[in-house]
Amino acid sequence: AAITMSSNAAKTAPVHPALLSTFGPGRGSGSSEFSAWAYLTRPRPTQQNNDGDKSDDDGDGGDAKLPNLVTAHANSLRIYTVLPNAGTLALTAVYDNLAGTICSLDVIPYGTGGGRQDGTPQDDDDPFEISEGERSCFDGLLIGFAGHPRLSLVYPAAPMVGAVDGTSGVGTGGVLLASSIVDLTPVLNEFSMGGTSYVEQDIIVSVNTASTSVNNIDPTVSVVLGGGIAIASFSLPKGPRPTEGSSMMKDSPSSTSWWRVASEPHVLPLASLASKVRVDFGDANKFAAASNAVNTRGGRGQSGTAVGTGPCLGHGFGDILDVTFLSGFTESTLLVLHTNPKKGGGRPWAGRMGRTAEVPLSTGGDDDEAEGDGTIPETVATGTKYGLSLTAISLSVHQKRSVVLWSLLDALPADSWKLVPHPTDGILVWGVNSIVYASSLGKIKCALAVNGFAKIGCPNGLLPPSSESSSFRSTSVHLEPNPSPLPKLSLQLEGAQVDFVTENIALVCLGNGSLHSLQFHHTDESRSPTVMSLSPLSHRVGGLGVASCLSILAKTCHTNNLKNYLRAHEDVTKEEDGKTDPEIQARGLMFIGSRMGDCTLLAFSINKPTLLIASSVDENKESAMLESGKRKLETNMTSSESNKRSKDDDKPGDENQNAMAEIDILQQEEEDLYRDDDEIDKKVSSSSIVSNEDSDVGEIESSLLRRSIRSLSVCRSILALDSLTGLGPLGPGCYGPVATCPALTENDNESLNLRTDPSTSMFSSAFSSAARHYIMPCGFGASGGVAVLTTPGRDNVGSSILGESDLCNMEGAVFGLPQSNLVILGKADGAGAIVLRGVVKEGAEEFEEVELEVKSDDMDVDNNSDCLLRSVDVLSKTKLLAASEVSFGSESVFSVFFVESPSPSGTPYSIVVMSGADSNLESGINLQVVFVHRISEVSGSVSVQHGELVSITPMVADEKTKSCVSFGCVWSSGHACVYCISVNEETSKRFEVSEWALVGDAPEKIAKAREEGFYGSDNIVAMDLFSLPHHVFEAQSVLSSDEKMPQTRASSTPLPDPLPSFLPDRLSMHGTWCAGHDHSQDQILVAICRRSGMLEIYDLLDLKRSPNDVSPIWQSRGCSHGASVLAHSDQDIAVRLPESHQVEAAEIRVFVTGPSLSLDGENDKEKDAWMLRSLCILVNTSLGDLHLYSGCKRSSNLNLEFTRIPLGNVSRPSEEAGRHLTKLRRKVIVSESDVMAFRPNRLHRFCAISGEDGLFAATQRPLWFVSERGTPTVVSHKSRHVAPAGGRPVPVSGFSAAMPAVFQNASCGFITLHERIGRIGSQRLTLYSGLYDVFSPHGVLPGGGICVQKVPLGVTVRHIEFIDDASVSTSSRPIYVMLISREIEADQSYLNDDGLSPEERQRIKDEKEAARIKKQVEADLGGFDIEQEWVEEIEREDCFEVDRNLGFAPSIPQRKYEVWLVDASSQFSVLDKYELNEFEHGTALKSLFLTNVIEDSDETPEKSLFVSVGTSFIDQDGEDLASKGRVLLFQVKKSKGRTQGVHRRHAPLHLNLRSEKEITVGPVTSLSSLKSEDTYRVVVGAGAEVTVEQWGSGKLTQVGFYHAHMQVQEIVLFKTFFLLSDAYDSLHFLVWRESDKSLTLLAKDYEPTQVFAAGLISRGGAMAFVCHDDRQNLKFFQYAPADAEARGGNKLVCRADVHIGSQTTALQSHWCQSSLLFNSCTMPSTLAALKQQDVLFGRLEDDQRFAVTFGTTDGSVGSIISLSEPVFWRLTALQSVMSNALESNCALSHRAWRLFRRSTSRGGCRSNDRKKGTIDGDLVMKFVDLALYEQEDLASSIGTTVGLLMDNLLEMQCASSII
């Protein structure tokens, strides 16, 4: 579609944008930024079990139920349940698109429930009183949000509040119910004193819940605001239960203490507390810094290190880095990690850390201090003067008091960044290079160095002693290396996550996924830790990218349940070793999350401490361990001889050497572990530390000593239980084919009867028939790869299409008879069918049509039938309505048909049973009729008239008896019948048919039903038969949360609970029911839906026993009306009905989603898979809406309830399709068809398709209903070359999951029959091998109707482009080019030892200093010139030295950029690669055409496809000189002489570098293709320059330029117009003039906006520019010269703005699909067919729309589309009323969430008036999932209709689709 610029007023009409998420970060990715364990869906264990940490592992306290795993990422929250057999994570609930970005997640134990706190006895009259099984409380979640400081205390939506007698109570709307929301914005505004940048700082939240369960004390919460300008605290006491929906609750005593609410916040008086710190700890700080005597109280001296001294504006605490609560105190004690405002005011720059020599030693750290009193020796090495402080504050929120207990002033390393509370006593101060442990009394007990740089950031008090001061430092606590015999460390802890397992063991996950064990070791004198050790676990979690969170569950009350996960692993280890199983100290679960990639759940077990060093009382033995003035170690892993420790022990080794050392240690531990007791010295000391003072070291320097440990706890086993596939950050994507697809021949093109227009294709003409996919870079580092956005039905990654065949004039019904290898297709004329037989010829699977030969059959005939005598007549002369295969308990297989045949008298419906014939395949269909039964007009049981057939259910076989098959029919009279075909026991060959009727409106009720209206009728309108265990619909009761699952009534089957402690939760059916793989407990159930909305479930056995007086086993009202909950109710409860709509259920299906049941598996994985199966009900209404319900047993008596699952998908027919059908009828392309009463089935259950069960809905837009970790979700089905919508009722008219048994994929494949392009009435039959691309190990079902296939590559993909050249790429072998970066860890071992003596180092240092001074003098005298040679020759000094006594130099992350050529048909395998230079970064990639312009030549220039790459150079020492870049031009060439091996089928390809050009004006950040007058050029954005480069004579030549203001971020081209985004100066609108080859500025935005991405949206001739800024906003501009705001046309006019809440890097345009084209995955062919049917299509503005798509750094995908004026204002009104009427998650406001966030940097540059003007698509799409009567209320409130709103939402949904 051409986009033109014009001065016409219509062209500058405002473009009304709408923002709609394709999928959010919650469903779109398994990434997690925060995680926690909480009891949300199951009650918290009793107090005895919860506090049983001191009980034995085998005690009764080890059977407590496992809590839920809660993860949060961006604006989404997910709740998982850990299944009991294999530890599979079942997704219980997802809360996506919250109105705020989560920045903290904390658990509030005992948040709700639990009865009364005052011990009042239970009130029998209280209907809301919880049962005994639910008396234990549930936890709450305290969620903090970014931006304005707000916190919400929330609980998952469940009928824990209300829900009496099946009615919906508070919180059943599927939202996160908030009991309290705390808005601290007024506090922030008060203390910010006019500052606006403080709101940018995320809040830091700490919760004190240590005494919640023990002393029943309310939890205390402290929040750091604005990066440290204030600390607000509040408590969470129990408050009353909400009183909505019931007046009796107001006076109920049980509602006085139900859930927690927030108290009034108390702001800590930091200024007075800082003054108190200065008074009490001022002089003491100086001595504490040296000797760590923190308890000494000194007078007020001239200490410059005191907090708050000096003239500074602030509260005296500087920057507050972290806060946490300290355990062991009666009152809440808050620890604050902060800086000293006098020393820089905040954290110093890292480069200043090495300048410790500038600090005068005599002053103790400050230049302006008076000299000390001489207590500190002058020979002590100086430390940093930027040490951090730790202050303990005791606070009482109720009394609003706070007191300083102690303070460690400037005593902590400057690189500290996190506080980790110890479980019982003390605190860990976590730094980048060190770990410091401080006790609860404010004493530093030990400090561990993790690398050789640890000393640089330490203050004086933690510096290790030198040789001159060894006597002074001998008893002080100082920084120590990793104790012996463990190796010294070379790690860095930036980004590391830690959590405690026991009091002495914590597990650490580094940023790269490496696991380590941090252990505390004690001496005999004290049980407080005095030494810490950090040892690797030889395990690295893959696919993380960067670790973001770590949560450990290792309480002893869960021991027995956790033992189940490690049972097999530990048993194998024991069997292999052949030794006794060691005593295990702890077992636990560890969840490691990442926002950059995948998350992993691990199970681990840790042994009790084992002996490393056997201490001896023999002094000779101790003295023998010393030699050459150095201490030696003797362990059991060495020989009895003493080995001499030399300096080689301190030499650094690579990772493999350290790993080998650790393996040796672990092997020795196991040997000591299993050694006989008499072989071990029995006089081992109980202490785990060997002190250095125990040895006589003589003249040994104490700095060379490091303490040793005797014992170490070894990790017994680490087992990965489950992994969550996370997409991570999503980059700019591209369209292209992915997998092989059948190539169309010339004959195929003729049969399509159309010509493909290359101009309408997303690709060139070579790929116009290929299905397109959207490929996006995803992840980071090891988790990096590409994400392929696709849908089932196309030739995707799994190559799922087996074959295709074109048919004509088929009715659409497809019936499969797998054992007979037949597929039957009904004809459109209503008589006869086509029979296809599946055969395998020469290894190829194919179908052949069966000729229906005339053959006489022997048969039994009921009801004196005189027709249907031959099988050929049945298949050629009747209308086939249903078919199935059943064995009837015998070895042979029978085929049962339900047919409609002409009949002179009686009903035309018959049941025909056929059996296989004993003849060859050539003799016809190989079936013979053995039984025929004619359906009578009147049911004999109740004598009701049938009328015409309305619908028929699928045939269901009785899996329990295997002797009958049943199905049901719904008649136009409002009645229904159930037919059962079974074998007559008297004669083995005789069949009989039983019939039972279900009555609709009885004759005596018809008159009354007419008076009550449409919904007063009880006529049956829909019916379904299904097989399930009977006990699923029965009610059970739970006596206690700790007792076993009770048995149900005698007539039902007991619940097969895998573990007694695994009770049902409140949000799902995980663990509630399990049918078993043999179906022996299944029974046939009948579901009917009446016109009144009543849904009834009957047992077929009860119907057989008493057909005239049968009662439903389960019933509920509201079906077909969209009710939120379908709950069982025995009484007739009045429910609200729609007022302006007469809607009923047209079809209903009860099905199961989840993994298929295995017939031969009994392992733990398959048992967990059984528990992931969800029972669902899908209702298709007469309006075309689809309502999906998922079952759960969550009330007190475990009654089954069905909760509606929000789909966010409009499924009813579109108004545009109806208008198109009218046009086709007017043109006589489609004939006028009579309205038929019979409705073919459109809801098809399937089993075992790629190992999954679910349902396929062949509606107007076909959908798959499948399961994602136990939660039902929906995926769209799109077909190749499908006809435009409107010609036929549904695009996919036939579906069958029964394929011929001779096919290899018969058990997992399926067949579809869809309407194809060409003549109306032509179809295409497609065979699929399954849905492997959807359920593959890397598949993700994010919602939004699409599935994502993640292809891991192990690198960070920066850009990807499709090679759109037929000579290179083919539809069977698509080629892509990628710009990637390898995230590597560079070794710095060269820093450990340079081989020089101290004297040589000093001499070299003096020479460098002299040369530097000389050059500086020369520069000052001669004038500074940045281009002088000496500037480039400056050598940077490494001011940081490695102290080998503490550790070695850690590795640092680096990146290496490469250009890859990949093959998408083989999982993106690399064909060729090109490595960029060292320190060269790839910044841009573009596949473009260039015209080879030859000057003074008359030949026509040729264009060629190039791959252009833009780079930038960043030197290792920084950017003293201006950065430069390069432009590289590659061509993809075919290699010669290498066509063997894997390249035999396709010629190998490689990248050929044609040209490179250095860009001196700056880094190349943008590359674009400019086409002007048939000449292709490349536009280069580098620095602040835009240059137009022309290709010719093998090089690029500049022909035009434009100078921007700051830095070119991106250039978007359309025609010859440029949209230039400046990184710091908003948008510029330029035009290229070919006449003078110049770039001219037309208009710009004068606001200094920091632009991250820019794009274009359009509708007809109106266009808008989209700008994404650093504040996560979107602004929409237009070029409107005639507008008054345009300043004469020089300014871009801002039309709208919105806040999207996430960051993106690219806004890419895509053509908006119409609802007529939505079902096609080959858009060009379907569009061409539509234009043949309607030549006027495409002329309306809505048909000429372009939207933008963006992927965010949070892993979500969204679109921005343009709406017409009427639709925009209609949806604006709907958005307004919905934001007020609907309950929102966490009590947050969507309206406030979408408000434009003003930048603090530009202050008042922008007007205070927000433009708004953007539709929040996520909010208005919730209208689709509301009940019909609620939709009517909202529609009437804005003066419109439900149908019009639904159609507008449908068109918006289709326009936002990117595939």
Image (cartoon, grey):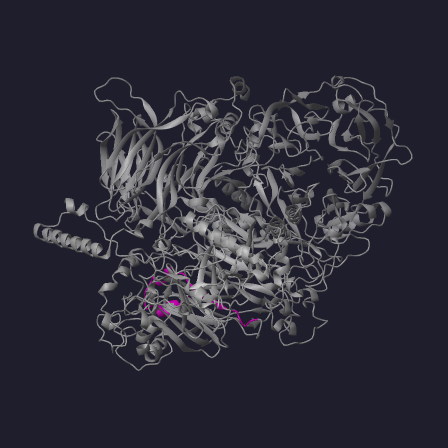
Q: Nearer the viewer, residue 1395 or 1814?
A: 1395
The magenta-colored residue range is 184-212
Give the number of marks. Answer: 0
Describe residue 1014's horizontal placement relative to residue 747 as left or right: right
1425 lies above or below 205: above
Considering the image in quadrants, where does the N terminus appear? top left
| Location of residue 436 in the rendering, given as x and y in whole percent from the top left corner | 40, 65
Describe residue 1405's horizontal placement relative to residue 21 as left or right: left
1676 lies above or below 1529: below
Please tell me whether residue 395 belongs to the stretch shown in magenta: no
- Residue 382 image-quadrant placement: bottom left
Residue at screen point 79% across, 19% down:
919
Describe residue 933's horizontal placement relative to residue 1832 as left or right: right
158 lies above or below 1457: below
| Location of residue 1166 in the rendering, given as x and y in whole percent from the top left corner | 65, 45
Which residue is the extreme one toward the front?
620
| Location of residue 1687 in the rendering, given as x and y in whole percent from the top left corner | 26, 47
Q: Is residue 588 visible?
A: no
- Residue 125 image-quadrant placement: bottom right
Q: Nearer the viewer, residue 1788 or 696?
A: 696
Q: Is residue 327 visible?
A: yes
